[in-house]
Image: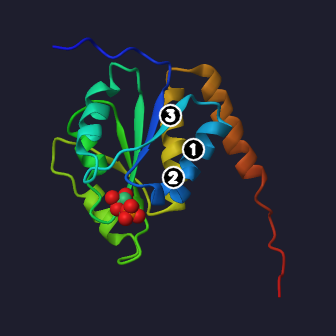
Amino acid sequence: MGEAAPDTGISVGVIMGSQSDWPTMAHAVQVLDELGIAHEVRIVSAHRTPDRLVAYAREAADRGLKAIIAGAGGAAHLPGMIASMTRVPVLGVPVQSAALNGMDSLLSIVQMPGGVPVATFAIGKAGATNAGLFAAALLANADAGLAQKLDAWRAAQTGGVAPVPVREG
Ligand code: RP5
């Protein structure tokens, strides 16, 4: 048995299967940045870097991660494989694929067998944003300061919605 990985003080891991997933996953990172949540960002591919995937999942709990946001596209095994090796909650983001518009990603992530949960979000930007907000909500259960920030974030969103549409065109 090796030594337990040290707690890094990082609460959320944002991982993605490829550099090409970054434009989508950047929206999760933006939310974490706005709310001041300590996070790390990594490329971890289920298919191209399987050893990296195993190490990341196996060390996640001992490193102190409270949530892992995992985005992938196509045959999107990353979130499910990570979830199979850690009890840290996994939030899956289906990246919009070129061939099937992300339906392949969505179904690959959401259709987990009973016993290995992955919380699955919408395809693309909305899903990544909401995964960031959901991770924040999980952490806010045990962090009053973060709860205040999250409430303020939501209040600002509400305040930004005009009551009457601008008549364009
Ligand atoms: C998946 O394959 C990645 O998550 C990405 O969405 C998709 C395409 O990857 P690239 O060929 O652009 O690296 O593993």
Name the image quarter holding the N terminus: top left
The three-letter amino acid code for the residue at tag 1 is Val
Name the image quarter holding the C terminus: bottom right
Q: Secondary structure at mark 2?
A: helix
Ligand 1's image quarter is bottom left
What residue sits right under mark 2 in the picture?
A: 25
The vertical placement of 8 against 158, above or below, is above
Q: Which mark is residue 40?
A: 3
Q: Residues within 10 Å of mark 3 (few under 14, many from 20)?
A: some
Within the image, what quadrant is residue 151 found in?
A: top right
Counting from the top left corner in percent of width and height, residue 14 is at 46, 41
The first of marks 3 and 2 along the sequence is: 2
Q: Residues within 10 Å of mark 1 (few under 14, many from 20)?
A: many
Q: CA distance from mark 3 to mark 1?
A: 9 Å
Counting from the top left corner in percent of width and height, residue 115 is at 16, 41
Residue plotted at (72% across, 51% down): 158
